[in-house]
Image (cartoon, rainbow, N blue to C red):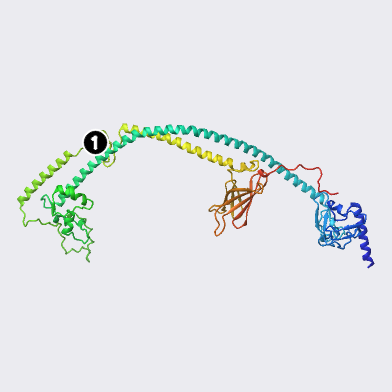
Amino acid sequence: MGGYMYCIYFLLIVGVKVSAEIGRPRGVSISMASKYEPNDQKIFRCLDGSGTIPYEHLNDDYCDCADGSDEPGTSACTNGKFHCTNAGYTPKNIQSSRVNDGVCDCCDGSDEYEGKIECVNNCKELGKKMREEQDEKRRLQEEGFKKREGFIAEANNMMEGKKLKIQELEKEKTELQDKLKELEAKKAEAEGPEKEAKDKHEQAWKEQKEVRDKERSAIKAREAFDELDLNKDGFVDVLEIIPHMEFDIDSNGVVSEEEAKEHLEDNEKVDFDEFSSRIWGNIQSIYKKLVPDDQKEVPPPPVEPQGETGVPVPNEEPQATPHITPIPDEGDDYDDEDDEDEDDEKSKLESATSSETQELLPTSEDLFPPEVQEDAVDEDKMPEYDEETKALIAAADEARKNHEEADKRSRDIDGEITTLTSYLNTDYGKDKEYAILRDNCYEYTDREYTYKLCPFATASQRPKAGGHETNLGRWGRWENDYKVQVYDHGQNCWNGPDRSVKVHLTCGPEHQLTNAYEPSRCEYAFDFITPCACNQPPQPQDKDPHDEL
């Protein structure tokens, strides 16, 4: 017991001696020293105001104050604070419970004054390293700040240049509007004669084609009539229609007399004039010429069977003789002499009819000159325009080209003005320092994805192994006093919100995307260093304000 009291007495004596040397109790910082100065009554008031104790009870290894403020230099109070002076480095406060616990918490070793462990005072070395790091950080910040100042000057020059460009474009647009009116008038003036000449040419070709089509139709009608008129009596009758299966209306395999009469417009028979004027136009699309049996396509003969000796076995069935199915006449018998007379009369009639038709119809030479006819290789293709019309077309084409070029330039000017105006209306920071980032893109790749940031445009990601790029957001707004950019309205997450990105900007010597992560589902965060975020660094002081002697 006596030895214990001796130790307590020794510690108190040492504590008072140390306190006298440093002018404040152990574990108290300079900033808090005034609260521990002894008053006339030698009374200490707990810092939380919960009570008072005699001054000599400070650091007596017994916790008297509820806030532990009476034991800053011992471990008696679990909620107390011990101040590490750490001269030459950064001072700090630790829990009083860590005092004399055998672990060096203060770089100056002041928390282990009982000597349970020997602590090396390495504050000067740590302070030197810290100041070197601070100097390097300050140097980089100064370098970034100088670049930022250059970016600001460049942005201002760029803004002025774009404003001047808009003025130039607006002036050009005004002048172009007058020119467009003039070119529009010239175009209309050239297109009038062109249209008139082309319409005249095309109308002449249309009329010629109609005449040609009529000629062809008349020839085809004549040929069809002659083919249908099997008995050559100058008429096509019901019985001559019946063999043609294309007139089988009900598709039962037989052409009845009623069906035949229907195609003859309810007539028993018709002559050529009525056939060509009333019948041919209705049946020409379905009419098919009869093919004699001996002209029909015959399938290849089957392979003849071979006998045991290899000699072909003759076919016992006789082959049918080719023939044309006869169509009976209205009479019971025929007179060869009468047939010959009828044929002569028919031939004369056909010759006369053909001659009359040719005399009534205009020829191609009546509609187009010979030189144009020679160029029209394809009868169904419209001949080329004459030289006068070609000249009018060329003049109109030139007028249209000039007008289209001017009109396109006018639209291009509108697009340029819109782009420049959008650029000028974008917020690039307090001093436009971030304008330099526009129209550039930066990438960062982790284990799975490559992330891309195009400032003031978009943010995206794509699989590192290749694949579809996902839109994470489009430029939205600034936050946190120009320290955070927000890109939102990105591609929708399945059963979730639209993707978005917050870009955290910090000072750095170069523009670099340094990290990308997803703190919440579909809400991404990028870390981006840039000289644009560098403010002017504070000037270094001759003396470290944290050095407490």
Residue ID for mark 1: 367
Q: Nearer the viewer, residue 223 or 12?
A: 12
Residue 250 occupies quadrant: bottom left
Residue 487 at what x, y percent from top left?
59, 50
Kind of residue at badge 1:
Leu
Q: Nearer the viewer, residue 470 or 308?
A: 470
Left or right side of 311 for 541: right
Quarter occupied by the N terminus: bottom right
Left or right side of 283 for 382: right
Residue 197 at what x, y percent from top left?
31, 34
- Tag 1, which secondary structure? helix
Give the vertical position of 306 relative to 405 (above or below).
below
Residue 507 at what x, y percent from top left?
68, 46
Give the vertical position of 434 relative to 74 (above or below).
above
Q: How many marks?
A: 1
Residue 547 at what x, y percent from top left?
82, 48
For the residue carrying disc 1, how many other residues have a C-alpha within 10 Å: few (<14), some (14-19), or many (20+)?
A: some
Residue located at (54% from left, 59% from top): 494
Give the vertical position of 120 relative to 350 (above or below).
below
Residue 110 occupies quadrant: bottom right
Residue located at (55% from left, 35% from top): 165
Q: Is residue 460 visible to us here?
A: no
Q: Nearer the viewer, residue 546 or 400?
A: 400
Q: Is residue 88 visible to us here?
A: yes
Q: Nearer the viewer, residue 462 or 488?
A: 488
